[in-house]
Amino acid sequence: MRVEFDRMGRPFVRPSAPMDCSPIYDGLRTNVPKHLMAFHDQPFNVSTAEPESEFPPAGDVSRYLLQTARRVEHRIRFNSLVTRVRHRPPPDPSQPLQNAPATYKERRWIVEVVEPPSSINPHPQEFKSISCDFVLAASGHYSVPYVPFIPSLWTWPKEIIHSCVYTNPRASIFHQKTVAVIGIGPSGYDILRELAMVREAEAGGGGQGGRKIKLYSVASHPAKLGWDFADPEAPGWTKQITSVPRFARIEGHKIWLVDGRLLEDIDLLCFATGYLYHFPFCWPLDQPWNTHPLTHPPPIPEPPPPPPPSFVQEPSNLPFPGAVRVHHLDQTQLFYYPDPSFGFLVLQTQVVPFPLAEYQARAIAARWSGRSPFAIVPMTDNETESKTVHGLSAPKEFEYEDELLERIGEGGEEGDNESHWGRVPAWKYKAREETAAKRRLELGY
């Protein structure tokens, strides 16, 4: 991967071919207990860890998903890439869609699909066009890396990576280098912890050589997930980490912090700053996206002078790849408000995604089928360009799930069965509150 810049100086990640990029890394463990992650009727009983862990590794989560999907595998079309989703144009270009014949209204979406090359079939097949009444975007938002705007980042002469390419702390790219990890979410915390543990062991064994290398945590607040690196009771590996505030600007190899300090010893910038929302199948010139687009380019604060043309690699005719939020939603963030026959799953962040997806899918299915055609209203904030728009940390997540059930005539104290789900149980609230303490007790961090 490489970081490039548009004409305004916004950084974006240009993938290699193919791009080996994933939010999954070798040492990843879940952030919440597995019983909180389970689907409604499928207990999380998969475990290869010894002893069995409440915070399983990524492989166990993958096995659980595959096990759960077997029940609906006959409905899944594999190796199919959706390349375009758009409104069916009216038969007469001068005639508005709402005045078109009923046959056109019934199948209002055109979805184009192609079978991409594979080891079995190295040649892509012809495009297939599918007519649909409803379309649900359940494509996730962890594939387009986000690198925030930093004035003059384009002048940085050394290496830049994103956490999506991180696999383990012993990778050669980190060897004998002073590393700055920008961001202190779950990935940033884990990367810092793993690098610090390795460096602590190397320092104890005299393996760092003569050069003094450092590990910087660049963030505006301490870690929320695990240890505060400044805590005097924190483990020894935290002493390998120097916490500094956010970058103000970069001038070549010099990095100015917001508190006025200057850093000149950094060899590698690792951005653990999350991902962008991206819907590449919603072409900006197609209906309805041409009048009500889902995404806007990330904002830049008080635009400084743009980078010189020699630093700009983005062709002027390409849209910026991704955004920090999604626009034109309803208040539940389930439906595209201009046309609610297009929906979304799990746009929210800071959530437990598997059960949330179930509650959302249940509400969407109830509305689309006509079983519970609840009213929707537009999202009140369609302007703010910030990830916080989609933040839904506990207990708001559970309150939101109960709200969805109420909209479709379910929830409350009534018993829980296939046709009627009861309210989110109290044990989930308690388990979420105790997660950080239990994770530290079991894993040590």
Image (cartoon, rainbow, N blue to C red):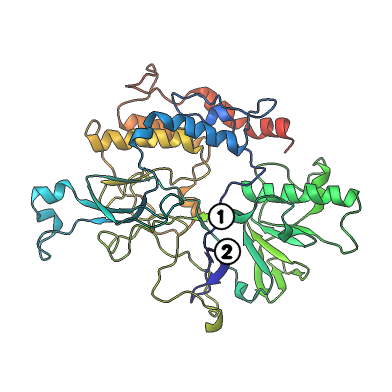
Q: In which quarter of the image is residue 27?
A: top right
- SS class, disc 2: loop
Circle 2 packing at 10 Å, graded few (<14), some (14-19), many (20+), is some
Identified at 65% across, 28% down, the residue is 53
Looking at this view, is 344 or 53 the one in front? 53
Circle 1 packing at 10 Å, graded few (<14), some (14-19), many (20+), is many
Query: Which residue has dot 1 on it?
Result: 21
**Kind of residue at disc 1:** Cys
Identified at 72% across, 74% down, the residue is 253
Query: Which residue has dot 2 on it?
Result: 1
**In the picture provided, is 393 more to the left or to the right than 195?**
left
Does the CB distance between marks 2 and 1 fall below 8 Å?
A: yes
**Kind of residue at disc 2:** Met
Q: Does residue 230 appear anywhere in the picture?
A: no
- SS class, disc 1: loop
How many labels were placed on the picture?
2
Looking at this view, is 230 or 102 the one in front? 102
Identified at 25% across, 32% down, the residue is 372
